[in-house]
Image (tube, grey):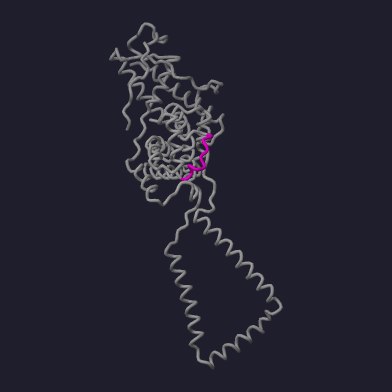
Amino acid sequence: MALQTDIEVQLVQQAQAGDVQAFEQLVLSHQRFVYNLALRAVNSPEEAQDLAQEALVRAWQGLPGFRGQASFRTWLYRITLNLCCNRLPRLRRELAQDALVESDEGEPGTAAVPAAEPSGDPAGDPARTLEAGDRRRFLHQQIDLLPPGQRLMVLMRYQQEMSYEEIAQAMDLPLGTVKTGLFRAHARLRQALSQYEEVPL
Amino acid sequence: MKELSDWETGQPAPANPGNPAGFPGTRRIQGDRLDAAIVEAVRTYPLDEAPAALRAGVMSRLKAGRIQAGRLGASMPRFRLTWVDFALSLFFAAMLGAVMLVGVMLPPPLAAYLRLQMRYWFQMLTLQPVLPLVLAAVSLASAGAAVLLAARLAWVRGILHRPPVTA
């Protein structure tokens, strides 16, 4: 769970002044997503741990130069992905290409990915609760099948609630590529879910 | 693995346009509810837990005092002496010592003979016309090496470093 922004800003300032405990709080707050970013990028738990550790140490080293133009997490995720790309030189090209992997639906419009809407409360109906659980598991499997670049984008967008601009900065990709990637990821998932919903029980 | 969270929205379920009669044999959600289900699934997508050793590893590296914030820049290559460096240093030092020792311990007739021989070789090579050029080249190379060594030392000590990675 990410820390509140104002608390995070304060912790960053303390860490910039050399407060190791403040930096430890930042590590606790971000290590899970940093690790998962690396894991999704390099597909090896051992390498992901190594890269995540290196990213966090480099963040500490680079803190005096961090001017707060981007949020701390965007900056940290960018360091992480840069390290992953250094480890796997083909990764950067793949991330950009992944974003452009076509789905069978149309091209993105300006409002590429819809915001979350109320999806109904199945709590009162056991059958619907079961159905919702099945649907969620199916979608998790489909997320696993997304190209790695698109998967990273949707995770940053919906789990970290990052803006398109922040994702573009973190992944070092053009804004349009991020919008396209998110649209196509969503289109893929939508298409898969539509087919899933067509199947008779 | 993270526990899957339950549905987050507490809103009453809207009418299902794809299955208005609530036909029990098929799953039917459409339109906005498809999008909502996708967003909900992405939000509850289980992330792996960070290894317990991750935080400990980071903090032990920081607390060991080997790394100071803002020093030893992020993309700086590591400078580390290996056994090869020590072995080569030992070899060259031994060679130099041996040459000096031999020079001191040579019998006087042999030393005189070698001096004559070297003078002969020197004349044979006729280096004298280019000697100033050779001396200048050696001086320049030495000066360059000194500058590189000083820069290297400054780099290692953190006086010089590349700017850290910034977003």
Residue found at the very far bottom of the displayed protein: B109
**Left or right, B125 with reference to B157:** right
The quadrant of the image that shows the C terminus of chain A is: top left
Q: Quadrant of residue B143?
A: bottom right
Instruction: For the N terminus of chain A, give its image quadrant.
Output: top left
Going 69% across and 80% down the picture, which residue do you hit?
B128
Q: How many marks?
A: 0
Q: Which residues are magenta?
A: A61-69
Residue ID at (53%, 57%): B154
Q: Nearer the viewer, residue A162 or A111?
A: A162
Q: Which residue is at a point 48% across and 73% down the rendered structure image?
A: B92
A101 falls in the magenta region: no
Quarter of the image where one finds residue B2: top left
In the orientation shown, which residue stands out farthest toward the left? A126
Measured as percent of width and height from the top left, residue A5 is found at: 44, 29
B56 and A146: which is toward the camera = B56
Residue A136 is left or right of residue B154, and the answer is left
Q: Give above or below for B159 relative to A187.
A: below
- Residue A81 to residue A126: above or below: below
Instruction: Give the percent coordinates (x, y) of residue B40.
Output: 39, 22
Expressed as whole percent of the image width and height from the top left, the position of residue A23 reads 41, 40
Residue B41 appears at what percent x and percent y? 39, 24
**Residue placed farthest to the top in the image?**
B21
Tell me where residue B124 sits by quadrant: bottom right
Q: Is residue A66 magenta?
A: yes
**Foreground residue among B155 and A177:** B155
